[in-house]
Image (tube, helix red, strand yellow):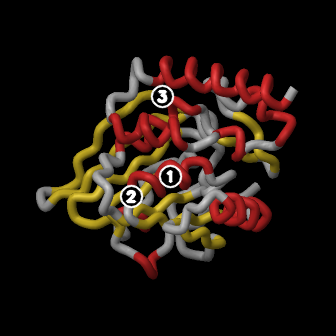
Amino acid sequence: MVKVAARRLEKAKAALLEELRQEVCDPRVLAALVRVPRERFVSPDLQVVAYENRPLPIGYGQTISQPLIVALMTEALELQGNEKVLEIGTGSGYQAALLALLARQVISVERIPELAQEAAGRLADQGFSNVEVHMAGQELGWPPEAPYDGIVVTAGAPAVPQALLDQLAMGGRLVIPVGSRDLQDLLQVRRTPQGLITRQLGPCRFVPLVSAEGGWPSD
């Protein structure tokens, strides 16, 4: 039965990757998606659907994002391998694992203690030694390690937070969902000597970014 389940997962993973290749062009991102086992980042009862192209619950009112959205956000960071990346919202740790294969260093911040602890253990168990998971503090992001070459935000904000722009290196890319609590546009914001350049990547739906600095107030 174990071998049968493993074969089913491999078949489902191959089908998902074929689907993602229709919209994701970066070969490094696609290779990372092959290497990272998404089933290790969901609860055992959801592993059978780990490679369906949809978000899945991870507890505490949070989700692991749809694989296509994760891939597009990762691609929009335009990573070459030597970057320091900040992730806002560790969640289960899945996107942090992908980033760890694509960047030199990953700093990930999570506001829910249980998720932070579980993700840190999961990432360590799988050998991702270049990821640090921190509990979120009063400040949005992680200023002690700034500036960052890339920042990815896995929760929707009402506007692009100035606190994160302040932590973005010159030439760096910030990828963030911006809009209402229920529906957002995914944006890539590039910091240049001439100012910010914003590119829209399409509609998306994320849980709200809860923060006093450019996010939504907690309920």
Q: Nearer the viewer, mark 1 or mark 3?
A: 1
Q: CA distance from mark 2 to mark 3?
A: 26 Å
Marks 1 and 2, the one that precedes in the sequence = 2
Q: Residues within 10 Å of mark 2 (few under 14, many from 20)?
A: some
Give the percent coordinates (x, y) of residue 205: 58, 34
Residue at which label 3 appears: 203
Q: Residue at x 74, y 27 (%)?
A: 49
Relative to 27, 127 lies left or right: right
Q: Residue at x 55, y 48 (%)?
A: 95
Residue 36 in view of the camera = yes
Q: Residue furthest left?
A: 194
Q: Residue furthest front?
A: 3
Marks 1 and 3, the one that precedes in the sequence = 1
Q: Amino acid at mark 1?
A: Val
Q: Amino acid at mark 2?
A: Ala
The numbered disc on residue 103 is 2
What is the quadrant of the C terminus in the image? Answer: bottom right
Q: Amino acid at mark 3?
A: Pro
Secondary structure beneath dot 3 equals strand
> Mark 1 near mark 2, Cβ–Cβ under 8 Å?
no
